Amino acid sequence: MLHLENVLTELHAVTIRDGLAFPKYFTAWQDGRPLDSEAPGYAKTVLDQLAWWAGALGSAREAAPYPA
């Protein structure tokens, strides 16, 4: 994953540190829900960070265009 983060940085994309993965998803889910009771908390963290960045970058773009 780290190599992909380096590529995204070169493209001026913003990455978030936390991630969410479901290895062996075919055995780690039941009835459409992950068996790991902490998964919803992880998902909330990632989605909250993503929403924050989306708002911050949207405001920044309105204030001044990105100098490419």
Image (cartoon, rainbow, N blue to C red):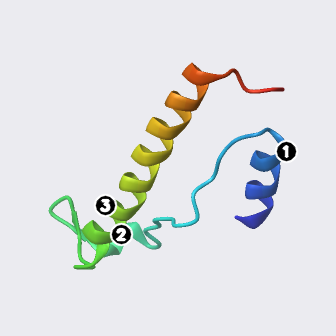
In the picture, the quarter occupied by the N terminus is bottom right
- Quarter where residue 13 is shown: top right
Picture coordinates of residue 31, whole percent (x, y) = 15, 62
Picture coordinates of residue 14, whole percent (x, y) = 65, 46
Question: With 32 as the anchor, is 42 left or right in this view?
Answer: right
Name the residue that disc number 2 marks: 42
Name the residue that disc number 3 marks: 44
What is the three-letter code of the residue carrying label 1?
Answer: Glu
Q: Are circles 2 and 3 on residues that touch, CB within 8 Å?
A: yes
Picture coordinates of residue 58, whole percent (x, y) = 51, 29
Toward the viewer: 68 or 7?
A: 68
Picture coordinates of residue 59, whole percent (x, y) = 50, 29
Toward the viewer: 47 or 52?
A: 52
Question: With 6 as the anchor, is 56 left or right in this view?
Answer: left
Question: With 37 as the anchor, is 27 left or right in this view?
Answer: right
- Quarter where residue 48 is shown: bottom left
SS of the residue under disc 2: helix
* Residue drawn at x 22%, y 79% as measured from the top left: 37
What is the three-letter code of the residue carrying label 3?
Answer: Lys
Q: Are circles 1 and 2 on residues that touch, CB within 8 Å?
A: no
Name the residue that disc number 1 marks: 10
Tell me the CA gap for discs 1 and 2.
27 Å
Toward the viewer: 39 or 10?
A: 10
Mark 1 burial class by Cα count in 10 Å: few <14, some 14-19, many 20+:
few
SS of the residue under disc 3: helix
Placement of 56 over or under 39, stated as above or below = above
In the picture, the quarter occupied by the C terminus is top right
Placement of 54 over or under 63, stated as above or below = below
Q: Residue furthest left?
A: 31
Tell me the CA gap for discs 3 and 1.
27 Å
Tell me the CA gap for discs 2 and 3.
5 Å
* Residue drawn at x 80%, y 61% as measured from the top left: 3
